[in-house]
Amino acid sequence: MGRVYTLVNQKGGVGKTTTAINLGACLARMDQKVLLVDIDPQANATSSLGVEKHSVKGGTYATLLGESLSSAQVLHNPRLQLSILPSSPDLAGAEVELVNELGRESRLLHAIAPLVDRYDYILIDCPPSLGLLTVNGLMAARDGVLIPVQCEYLALEGLGELMRTVKRVQVALFPSLHVRGVILTMFDHRTHLANDVVAEVKKYFKDLVFETIIPRSIRLAEAPSYGLPITAYAPGSAAAKAYESLARELLLGDGKKIPQAVERGKKLRLRRT
């Protein structure tokens, strides 16, 4: 049975969607079957993988409203060996349409249930808010929540509110909900502030913080405009290597083995540097 992780942070611009895309792409390169589920009406994860969001007919909107089976809406990218349940701007209406529906918080959980056995990893990309769509993402996070945190001061301010929301969902709806890990993103080693933020996050979350830190990168910002993850757009970049390291760390933490071909490639890169 596959693992289901939800990436969440109500603050925009912290690298949440970037992490969902690139972590998923790296896991796929490590022989994992990966499905990215986009439940953000902005559909940035969808467009970042080269899918025109305005051309999506159905997607997560149709699955949440029960108009279509999730399996019928999944798109597969053979080049990246990565699948996506895409979003579209239509999803913005789902929160209004579901507000009076019974079990509205669990629509995503039930929609993706038939897919869990088909993939090694399902990564859910939430909108930058704490509304009904995000609650659906939290309810579907069977194996935990991944929280990307930008290495800047303002990113810290919203963490308390996010953790309170996680706690409320845990108490009222999903007792086993937990934080799987915190991912530090957009790190600029030249600033003292970035290092202070890293120290503060580690002080609060302790062992839940991943050792891998994602650097700030122009290449990383450019990649979505080409519909590619960083591993395909700039595979030799520091950001690509960081996401590869993060994927390894997640796999090992989940008790999985790193494919031998990947480890051989890692050793070869180390010899050349």
Image (cartoon, rainbow, N blue to C red):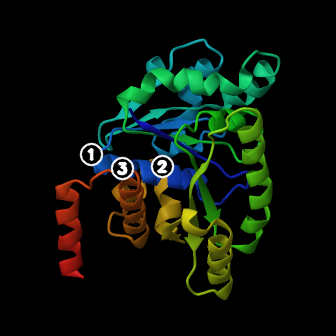
Q: Where is residue 141 in the image (x, y as percent from the top left)?
A: 57, 39
Q: From what the image shows, is residue 37 above or below residue 63?
A: below
Q: From what the image shows, is residue 272 above or below residue 102?
A: below
Q: Which amino acid does label 2 sit on?
A: Ile
Closest to the observer, 82 or 169: 169
Hey, which quadrant is residue 1 in on the image?
A: top left
Q: Residue at x 61, y 31 (%)?
A: 88
Q: Say which quadrant the C terminus sits in.
A: bottom left
Q: Where is residue 10 in the image (x, y as percent from the top left)?
A: 73, 51
Q: What residue type is labelled 1?
A: Asp
Which dot, 3 or 2, sits closer to the camera?
A: 3
Q: Residue at x 69, y 39 (%)?
A: 134
Which residue is denoted by mark 3 in the rendering? 27
SS of the residue under disc 3: helix
Which dot, 2 or 1, sits closer to the camera?
A: 1
**Dot placed on the residue nearer the N-terminal end, 3 or 2:** 2
Closest to the observer, 87 or 141: 141
SS of the residue under disc 1: loop
Q: Say whether residue 242 is visible.
A: yes
Q: Which amino acid does label 3 sit on?
A: Leu
Question: Could you give the CA–CA distance between mark 1 and mark 3, rounded to whole angstroms?
Answer: 7 Å
Which label sits on residue 31? 1
Q: From what the image shows, is residue 84 above or below residue 244?
A: above
**Dot placed on the residue nearer the N-terminal end, 2 or 1:** 2
Closest to the observer, 86 or 55: 86
The crowding category of the residue bearing disc 1, from other C-alpha atoms within 10 Å (few below 14, some 14 to 19, many at least 20), is: some
Which residue is denoted by mark 2 in the rendering? 21
